[in-house]
Amino acid sequence: MLIRRRIGRRSVLSTAVGIAALAAGSLVNAGAAQADPSVSIRPVLGGLAAPRGIVFDARGSMYVSESGVAGSGPAGLTHTGKVDKFTWGSTTPAWTKEFNSLYATEDPSAPPDVLGPEGLSVVPNGCKEDPRACRVLMITSESTPGIRAATGGSVVDRQAGHLYRLDGNTGAAESKSNVGSQMYQWTGDHSSLFPDDFPDSNPYGVLVTKGAGRARTFVADAGANTISEIMPGGNARVVSYIPNEDFGAFRDATPTCIAQGPDGYLYVGTLDFVSNLFVPPGTGGFSSVWRVNPNANYPTAPTKWATGLTTITGCTFDRQGNFWAAEMFAGGLGANPPGDIVQIPFAHPTAQAHFGLGQLPVPGGIAQGPDGAMYVTVGSSAPGVSGGVMRVSVNH
């Protein structure tokens, strides 16, 4: 069905969405859990609808994507997806740009799942010196043909699976690539890789890199399991296919995010939803971070860089070269609330430091702010407008 194959194998995630709804209620009590005294966690924003992507531009402005809220009926579209810009220190949006939001009900006893605007990345092009140069890229979920096929033609979303460039000053959006439809076609042509699920596409993570004098754009597709580079003109070049795990109940890696390491390679986090939460004891440790050569071409295989993480939904490197990831359901479905973030030193990928379990309900994205703290979207898989942004400061 519609969203069951996407970020999180949604037929099972409908159960988790109910847990997420309970977890979102913990936002107002986010400081209630016993915290490490060297870690400060506090709310920055609230009242967001399934916030997922987060990023800061060179002037310190924060951008947040909201996947939106569901409408009536078993499946359909609302126009509640958003990207919001907040200038540094402000809790009132400088602008808000609306997008489509797709919803589908897998379990009538649970809230519908919602997908819309997802990953964000800034374009490194002189924004700090000239505010008119500020640009942000945003990726939307799913694909037009995939949604149409899954709903028997009843839902048509022409924004699905598009890569948009947003003007940092006005929010004006321009589609730069229909990567979702391209990956839906690619997985149809490579259905032997995942015969039970392909064709499929769900673009979820985006990253703009700069090296050798030019910016490059990469997309992680949580449905196609591909990492692709968006070329001038909008064509997607498949760089790598993230392999499914050889264990667990369902075998679906589900890449969700991309970060550029100090070595210039791409580091890709995976969700591995079913294996983390529904393979006994169901408390995680099955997600990985894959190292991908940005200049490779499929079928060049990626290499595994780090393991032992849980349901990665967002990742980044800080300015000291540490890898950070948001773990949406860390602690398992029995945690109240689930969710955590993890730091991994680049030189020691087997070392992990966790901050925020019990205080960061179902996190989605993570980014380092201009003040050096990490900012995390929370309530990212909860219904309604119960999500927000938390600030995490670690004093070593």
Image: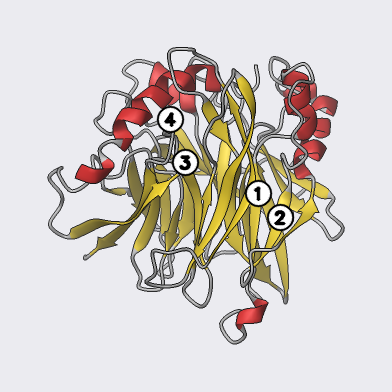
Q: Amino acid at mark 3?
A: Ala
Q: Sequence-wise, which precedes: disc 3 or disc 1?
A: 3
Of badges 2 and 4, the one in the foreground is 2
Locate residue 65 relative to residue 371 in the image: left or right. right
Q: Sequence-wise, which precedes: disc 2 or disc 3?
A: 3
Label 2, residues with CA under 10 Å away: few <14, some 14-19, many ≥20: many
Residue 131's spot in the image, x, y percent?
60, 81
Up/down of 200 relative to 379, above or below: above
Q: Sequence-wise, which precedes: disc 4 or disc 3?
A: 3
Read off the residue under disc 2: 164
- Cα separation, mark 2 vs mark 3, equals 19 Å
- Cα separation, mark 3 vs mark 1, equals 15 Å
Locate residue 327 relative to residue 267 in the image: left or right. left
Read off the residue under disc 3: 50
Residue 108's spot in the image, x, y percent?
49, 12
Q: Give me the residue at 60% from left, 79% from top.
A: 127
Up/down of 134 relative to 204, above or below: below
Q: Amino acid at mark 2?
A: Tyr
Residue 186's spot in the image, x, y percent?
82, 33
Of badges 4 and 3, the one in the foreground is 3
Residue 196's spot in the image, x, y percent?
69, 14
As rendered, which of 217 and 300 lies closer to the eye?
A: 217
Q: Are marks 1 and 2 in contact (CB under 8 Å)?
A: yes
Read off the residue under disc 1: 139
Q: Are marks 3 and 1 in contact (CB under 8 Å)?
A: no
Q: Give me the residue at 42% from left, 18% from top.
A: 15
- Cα separation, mark 4 vs mark 1, equals 26 Å
